[in-house]
Image (cartoon, rainbow, N blue to C red):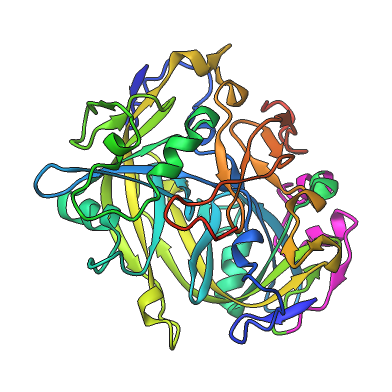
Amino acid sequence: MFYDAAKRDHGLPQDPLKSLIVPRPIGWISTVDRQGRVNLAPYSFYNAMSEFPPIVCFGITGTYGSTPTKHSRMNAELTGEFVVNMVSESLKEQMNVTTTMVEFGIDELKLAGLTPEPSTLVKPPRVKESPVALECRYWRTIELPVEKGHEAKRGSVVFGQVVGVHIDDAIIKDGRIDTLAFKPVARLGYSEYTTTDNVWRMRRPDDPKYQ
Amino acid sequence: MFYDTARRDHGMTQDPLTALIVPRPIGWISTLDGHGRVNLAPYSFYNAVSASPPMVYFSTTGTYGDNPTKHSRRNAEETGEFVVNMVSAVLAKQMNITTSMVDYGVDEMKLAGLTPAPSRYVKPPRVAESPIALECKYWKTIEMPIEEGRETHQATVVFGRVVGIHVDDGIVKNGRIDTLAFKPVARLGYSEYTTTENVWRMPRPDDPRYQ
């Protein structure tokens, strides 16, 4: 089948777009507001964008309750800092609790029964239970185009530079990160998720030595 | 363990960064150069970034042979169009062939034994064997910051608006995209990949009806 992305004439009961760009990594982002109150929320329009320097970004859609943008973006812009925590398989239920729509200033980290751990270079705490945490300094926000008739769903992308990295020693084996030791959760379409349960190596034809 | 990303004092033989932002979806991007010659290359700094309007982005790092940017970026900027093809499990080997460093103008689609199929709204062909293809119009490029001493590794992010979508009818079941019918390949760290082989539903606590 073919459909026009503007007309959305796919004939399916639910819009399939997000199920076509998969699996999406989850950035579980902790921030603090000006009063130091913690916020924690998962984003799947998240990825690395540069290695030198290390840059990550996350896309945000529309308004959130009475605040003009989602809390994570607002806090990142106001304080200049955020932390990206890894959602391992054992943390999936807690991650889901943090998707709940709550008022600005409510601490989802506490709501999910998680433990805040001080970061080293930035103020927002990291999730102690996460096997990986990336401490980031806010760089900039890019506003995305507006779709006519969907003005409230306008997106934006927040970029940050990774300045410090925490890794649980238990997921390092033979000097490498062992993905199967934490099984990252990733986002699919609809209400669907997946867990990384298999790993294989495939070397570039022109660089067979890189393992 | 903790390390400072500017010092990269992680003590491991290989830099772990890309193993910490996982699993990354793969955008297998087909473009045309100014002479109409096909290019096909995979990018894992790729994701959806907005649903209204549907937008995707991918990042390219540094120079490519004699060219100042990778061919996909150059072609997308020059022609204003690109197509993102899905790498299903059965296409993993062909995808890997298209990572080979070849000269500008060499058709990696042909090199990998794949079939070009015409697109509807844009000129670059899609990969006929891919179960999903997103036809995109180039929107803009954002230059990432430069790391001192790593000037040739500067990254750039290319944004595009999805205008037309092809979905193989064989992966649509009960009105939903069936991820396990094509098993997308995703990128991990080092030379590692994974295939999506499990799917579960986890509705939001505040929206239990959305399945």
Q: Nearer the viewer, residue A81 or A39?
A: A81
Residue B155 in sight in this render: yes
Q: Position of residue A17 (x, y in %)?
A: 47, 33
Left or right relative to B167: residue B172: right
In the displayed structure, B176 sits above or below A138; it is: above
The quadrant where residue B16 appears: bottom right
| Residue drawn 76% across the image and 78% down it | B2
Q: Residue A201 lies in magenta, yes or no?
A: no
| Residue drawn 61% across the image and 36% down it | A188
| Quadrant, the C terminus of chain B | top right
In the displayed structure, B117 sits above or below A138; it is: above
Left or right relative to B83: residue A139: right
Q: Nearer the viewer, residue A158 or B102?
A: B102
| Quadrant, the N terminus of chain B | bottom right
Q: Nearer the viewer, residue A49 or A84?
A: A49
Q: Position of residue B80 (x, y in %)?
A: 20, 49
Q: Nearer the viewer, residue A133 or B189?
A: B189
| Residue drawn 86% across the image and 63% down it | A170
In the displayed structure, B187 sits above or below A71; it is: above
Q: Position of residue B29 (x, y in %)?
A: 35, 44
Q: Residue furthest top?
A: B174
Q: Position of residue B176 (x, y in %)?
A: 56, 19
The quadrant where residue B136 appears: top left
Number of callouts: 0
In the displayed structure, B107 sits above or below A167; it is: above
- Secondary structure mostly seen in magenta is loop
| Residue drawn 71% across the image and 48% down it | A101
Q: What residue range appears in magenta?
A: A93-120
Q: Residue A100 lies in magenta, yes or no?
A: yes
